[in-house]
């Protein structure tokens, strides 16, 4: 019960924050609401047993990205530019389109049998130490899950709770103790993420250099006097 | 122990996504547009993690979500730099002014 | 220089190096004029036009060539211990070309008789000489090898080669020296050519071409020596064409004169007619024999037989099959040649064709009937050219080729050669009776004498022909140079009817000319056999002809014609001399301005006169004849009866008992009588004037006109070849204009019409279609441009709308 309660609380906070971001015209307030929304998402991650991811969400988004955005606001939105009003007509059109998009998404979510699709995915035992039992449980689970959104993976959930950090770290090193390679069949490659990890690392480096290059101090061409006027 | 189920999380992700799209579509402020992008990415992340939890996608979902966070951070950095340049050139952050691509 | 295999069968103690040394000497003599040619062609690069150096270079080249040739001849004589002369007391002497030697020998009549006796004695005791191959041959350089056929640069040296080399280089040296004086007026920057009239009435004027003349002369010398030295028929053909080219260049030396350029073209084209036959002959030889080589060639331990060995074998006889249709070829070892186990043979008629083909080349080059008309026109060239190219050497190359190819000729071919020569000598001599141009008289006389040589070859008088070739070269070049001297002295007057009495002013020229005239007329002291060179050689020819006609009574004409022509020759030569030098001057102007020439011109005359008088000393027992006859490959020691289509018997001419020897004194007597009659007639007509030539001319005006028109050969050829070509050309022109042009024009206008229509189609439909596509695209782009607002938010909105529409469509169309 407590989990459901927590979920609904944070779900409402998340959605409400997001809507508030859309609705607010002031950039600084938007940033505040964004913090609320993203923080709630982090809470949802915790509820989904993704403890490392939730922590990363808090650290990077709430602690990093949003602060960065606020810095951006400070650097750009001086005085009259803090709020740039959206025309009411645009707001109405945007709301209508958004609602229609939401309806499309909701209807597609509701019309898909996720259990059946999940059964088609390669089996992913949560722990290498209990591979066999998990697979049996998984098979039962698939039967149980059919026709219902209620998913019950007691054993897996218990074993997984709060223990994703090590597994994520191993997977970034290219090791997947949670995978049974024998079941991979023909495509029995180690399903680790070593190479993507490295690529992303280099990518980050490049992006940082690029960002620094783009944002470096330049002579402002047109506008010395205008700014001083402001 | 009660469970809210996959669909509820997907609904949250959808709401976040739609809000992000609308934010991008309506905000004239460049920073606002960036915030919309963050919302869209978070919606996607919620979906990934939910699938990781409730389907046999497993750890892969969380891994991908982690990549998305990292790339979002990178994107934010670059986008902010672009926004600063834009501001340098136009003395405003209003994206409607940046219509140089008009045919 | 690659030295090929050396093939010879000298048995007794001749070093193999002999061939190498001879080859080296003759090659130097052969190539020096080429070097001279190169230097003289580029003369203006190192010197100026007025410098005489070019002439000295040319004289030096040919003079050193003469020394080399003479050395080679002496060396050959020593190496063979003068076996060819067969007379021990002649060991110390060279061949007849040494002037002093010839003079010395000339006076010793008794000695000569003695020589005859010894000669006869030796011949009667020794067995008939084996038909040994008395030659050296080898290869300079192999150009190519086509399966069986080698195309190479070869050399072939026998006594004939040596004699020809010495003769050609000696005469060429004399003429080169003479030309220094004769061409003197070319040493100027402004040469005015009085023969070329311009439209404004003036004369054509050009820079002098002294060096160019000597360059051509050197090129000619090189080519001529190349013919003589060639070791295969293909190489002969190459140099054959080269002398043709030199002749063309020299005849057309005064190219601005229309007559000269026409004459050059005429000579070149008529030679091509003959060369066509030559080519056919070469093809037959290639196909049937697979070799072009004259001599045998040893490669490793195998000896490949040359052309002559293949046809004649070791014994000099044709190996004809029983039905007379095939001739078996011989290999170098005296057996029938075999290939793949079958005996090699050639069809008899094909062999006849090959012989006639090669002889056709000779006809062209030696101006024989029916291609004789180019030679008189060739007198348009400078007189030294006429002396060297068109009397002494190049035209004799035809005779030389026919003599070289004698082993390949069958009796039928020989009969043809004899008749061609016979016709030629008579026609040319009769024309010479009426010509008044001094050079043309000599030209016709040349043709006539060449006819004698051909006749001699035809009647198996091989040695007599070449004997006459050499003697004729001397006295004819002498006479040409004398005529050149007259022309130069009289300031380019060539018409004898304007001369007369010149002997008072030009003593040397007149009396050297007289020597030449006596020589060609064949005069001798009656009762003895002492005469000038022409007497001996013509004597030998007439004797051969008489022997032939005795054996073949059907061909008596072959004896009558040369006998009569000997008288005619004597007549017209003395007529020339009397008209020019004797009597009283007919044109006072010419006589007054006439003068003797400087010594650079008269010295060669004297030297040549000595040789013209004495080179044939000894007659057929003398050294020259023996030297030449030594290289005969098919010695006729007995009568040869032909088995082919022409039933003729070739007389034997070697040895004391031979057919020719029997009739020798008779023939000599008849020829001498004929010549004396001719001389007397000329004396009566032109000196004593007991008979008026004009009366005879009027009485026989028909014959006279016929002769003046050169037997109407030019008209005949005009009617036979030129007129038909004109008619055909006219017809072709009208066909072109009447038929082809309208077709072409209509096709052209049709094409234009089609093109116009095509253009209209292109412009309206094709272009229109393309333009339509372009316009539509442009307009669509223009209208779509409006949508591209460049506004970021609008794009996002459109994306969202797009997704909605897409999903909506999916949901509505795809059933669950």
Image (cartoon, helix red, strand yellow):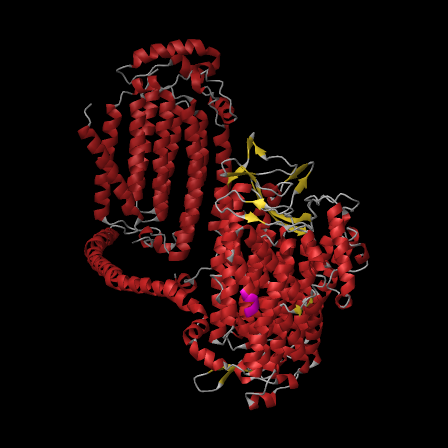
Secondary structure that dominates the magenta span: helix
Relative to A98, residue C768 above or below:
below
Q: Nearer the viewer, residue A118 or B70?
A: A118
C224 vs B71, left or right, is right
Q: Which residues are magenta?
A: C564-568
Residue C199 seen by the camera: yes
Looking at the image, which residue is at 60% across and 35% down?
A: C336
C418 displayed left or right of C20:
left
Instruction: State the image coordinates of residue C656 (x, y, percent, origin top left).
Output: 69, 51
Which part of the image, by quadrant, shows the N terminus of chain B? top left
Q: Eyeballing the image, is C486 above or below C111?
A: below
Give left or right: position of B2 versus C562. Answer: left
Residue A213, placed above or below residue A121: below
Residue C623 falls within the magenta-colored stretch:
no
Q: Quadrant of residue C229?
A: bottom right
Q: Nearer the viewer, residue C184 or C676?
A: C676
Q: Quadrant of the C terminus of chain B?
A: bottom left
Q: Nearer the viewer, residue C113 or B56?
A: C113
Vertical comparison of C163 with A186: above or below: below
Total count of labels: 0
Q: Residue C586: x and y, percent?
A: 55, 87
Residue C741's image quarter? bottom left
In the rendered image, residue A229, in percent from the top left (x then y), is placed at 39, 63
List x then y, in percent, for residue C220.
61, 64
Q: Is residue C57 visible?
A: no
Q: Residue at x 30, y 50 (%)?
A: C791
Return the residue nearer the eye: C803 or C765. Answer: C765
């Amino acid at each position: 019960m407590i989990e459901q309660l927590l979920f609904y609380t944070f779900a409402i906070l998340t959605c409400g924050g997001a809507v508030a971001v859309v609705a607010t015209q002031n950039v600084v307030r938007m940033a505040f609401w964004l913090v609320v929304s993203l923080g709630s998402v982090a809470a949802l991650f915790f509820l989904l047993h993704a403890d490392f991811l939730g922590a990363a969400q808090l650290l990077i988004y709430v602690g990093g990205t949003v602060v960065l955005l606020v810095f951006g606001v400070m650097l750009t939105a001086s005085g009259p530019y803090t709020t740039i009003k959206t025309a009411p007509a645009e707001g109405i059109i945007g709301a209508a389109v958004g609602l229609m998009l939401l309806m499309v998404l909701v209807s597609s979510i509701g019309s898909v049998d996720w259990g059946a699709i999940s059964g088609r995915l390669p089996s992913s035992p949560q722990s290498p130490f209990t591979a066999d039992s998990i697979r049996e449980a998984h098979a039962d689970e698939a039967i149980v899950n059919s026709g219902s959104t209620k998913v019950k993976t007691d054993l897996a959930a218990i074993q997984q709770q709060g223990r994703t950090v090590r597994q994520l770290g191993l997977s970034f090193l290219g090791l997947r103790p949670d995978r049974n390679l024998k079941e991979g069949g023909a495509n029995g490659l180690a399903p680790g993420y070593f190479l993507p990890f490295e690529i992303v690392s280099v990518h980050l480096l490049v992006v940082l250099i690029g960002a620094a290059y783009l944002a470096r101090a330049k002579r402002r061409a047109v506008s010395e006097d205008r700014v001083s006027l402001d | 122990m009660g469970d809210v189920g996959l669909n509820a999380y997907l609904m949250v992700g959808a709401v976040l996504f739609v809000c992000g799209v609308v934010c991008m579509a309506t905000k004239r402020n460049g920073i606002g547009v960036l915030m919309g992008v963050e919302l869209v990415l978070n919606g996607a992340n919620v979906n990934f993690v939910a699938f990781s939890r409730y389907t046999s996608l497993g750890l892969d979902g969380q891994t991908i979500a982690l990549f998305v966070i990292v790339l979002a951070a990178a994107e934010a950095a670059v986008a902010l730099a672009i926004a600063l340049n834009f501001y340098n050139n136009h003395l405003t952050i209003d994206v409607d002014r940046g219509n140089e691509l008009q045919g | 220089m690659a030295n090929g295999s050396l093939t010879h069968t000298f048995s007794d103690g001749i070093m193999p190096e002999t061939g190498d040394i001879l080859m080296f000497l003759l090659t130097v003599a052969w190539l020096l004029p080429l070097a001279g040619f190169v230097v003289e062609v580029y003369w203006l690069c190192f010197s100026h036009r007025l410098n005489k150096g070019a002439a000295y270079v040319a004289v030096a080249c040919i003079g050193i060539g003469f020394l080399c040739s003479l050395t080679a001849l002496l060396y050959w004589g020593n190496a063979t211990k003068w076996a060819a002369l067969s007379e021990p007391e002649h060991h110390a002497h060279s061949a007849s070309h040494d002037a002093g030697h010839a003079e010395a020998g000339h006076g010793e009549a008794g000695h000569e008789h003695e020589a005859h006796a010894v000669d006869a004695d030796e011949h009667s005791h020794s067995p008939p000489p084996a038909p040994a191959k008395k030659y050296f041959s080898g290869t300079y350089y192999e150009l190519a090898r086509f399966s069986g056929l080698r195309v190479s640069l070869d050399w072939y040296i026998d006594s004939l080669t040596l004699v020809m080399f010495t003769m050609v280089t000696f005469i060429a040296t004399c003429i080169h020296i003479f030309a220094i004086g004769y061409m003197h007026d070319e040493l100027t920057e402004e040469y005015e050519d009085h023969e070329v009239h311009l439209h404004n009435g003036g004369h054509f004027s050009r820079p002098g071409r002294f060096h160019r003349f000597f360059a051509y002369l050197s090129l000619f010398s090189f080519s001529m020596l190349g013919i003589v030295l060639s070791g295969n028929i293909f190489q002969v053909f190459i140099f054959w064409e080269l002398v043709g080219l030199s002749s063309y260049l020299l005849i057309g030396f005064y190219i601005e004169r229309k007559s000269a350029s026409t004459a050059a073209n005429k000579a070149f084209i008529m030679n091509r007619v003959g060369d066509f036959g030559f080519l056919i002959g070469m093809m037959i030889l290639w196909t049937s024999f697979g070799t072009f080589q004259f001599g045998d060639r040893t490669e490793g331990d195998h000896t490949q037989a040359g052309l002559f060995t293949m046809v004649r074998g070791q014994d000099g006889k044709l190996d004809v099959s029983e039905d007379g249709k095939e001739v078996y070829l011989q290999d170098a070892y005296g057996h029938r040649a075999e290939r793949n186990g079958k005996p090699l043979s050639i069809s008899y008629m094909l062999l006849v064709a090959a012989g006639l083909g090669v002889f056709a080349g000779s006809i062209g080059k030696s101006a024989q009937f029916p291609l004789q008309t180019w030679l008189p026109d060739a007198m348009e060239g400078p007189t030294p050219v006429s002396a060297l190219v068109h009397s002494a050497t190049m035209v004799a190359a035809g005779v030389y080729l026919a003599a070289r190819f004698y082993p390949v000729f069958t009796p039928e071919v020989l009969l043809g050669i004899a008749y061609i020569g016979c016709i030629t000598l008579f026609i040319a001599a009769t024309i010479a009776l009426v010509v008044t141009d001094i050079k043309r008289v000599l030209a016709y006389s040349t043709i006539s004498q060449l006819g004698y040589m051909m006749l001699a070859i035809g009647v198996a008088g091989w040695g007599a022909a070449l004997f006459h070739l050499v003697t004729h070269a001397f006295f004819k070049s002498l006479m040409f140079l004398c005529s050149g001297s007259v022309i130069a002295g009289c300031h380019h007057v060539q018409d004898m009817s304007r001369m007369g009495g010149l002997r008072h002013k030009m003593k040397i020229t007149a009396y050297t000319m007289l020597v030449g005239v006596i020589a060609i007329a064949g005069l001798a002291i009656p009762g003895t056999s002492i005469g000038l060179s022409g007497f001996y050689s013509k004597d030998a020819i007439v004797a051969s002809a008489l022997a032939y006609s005795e054996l073949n009574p059907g061909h008596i004409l072959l004896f009558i014609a040369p006998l009569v022509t000997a008288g005619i020759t004597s007549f017209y030569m003395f007529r020339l001399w009397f008209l020019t030098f004797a009597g009283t001057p007919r044109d006072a102007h010419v006589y007054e301005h006439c003068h003797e020439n400087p010594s650079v011109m008269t010295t060669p005359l004297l030297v040549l006169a000595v040789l013209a008088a004495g080179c044939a000393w000894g007659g057929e027992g003398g050294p020259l004849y023996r030297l030449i006859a030594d290289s005969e490959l098919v010695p006729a020691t007995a009568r040869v009866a032909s088995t082919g289509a022409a039933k003729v018997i070739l007389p034997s001419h070697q040895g004391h008992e031979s057919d020719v020897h029997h009739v020798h004194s008779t023939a000599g007597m008849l020829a001498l009588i004929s010549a004396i009659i001719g001389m007397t007639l000329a004396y009566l007509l032109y000196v004593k004037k007991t008979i008026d030539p004009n009366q005879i001319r009027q009485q026989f005006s028909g014959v006279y006109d016929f002769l003046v028109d050169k037997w109407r050969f030019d008209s005949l050829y005009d009617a036979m070849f030129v007129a038909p070509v004109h008619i055909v050309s006219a017809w072709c022109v009208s066909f072109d204009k009447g038929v082809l042009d309208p077709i072409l024009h209509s096709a052209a206008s049709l094409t234009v019409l089609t093109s116009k229509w095509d253009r209209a189609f292109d412009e309206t439909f094709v272009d229109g279609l393309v333009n339509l596509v372009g316009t539509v695209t442009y307009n669509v782009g223009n209208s779509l441009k409006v949508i591209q607002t460049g506004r970021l938010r609008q794009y996002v909105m459109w994306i969202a709308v797009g997704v909605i529409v897409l999903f909506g469509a999916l949901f509505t169309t795809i059933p669950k």
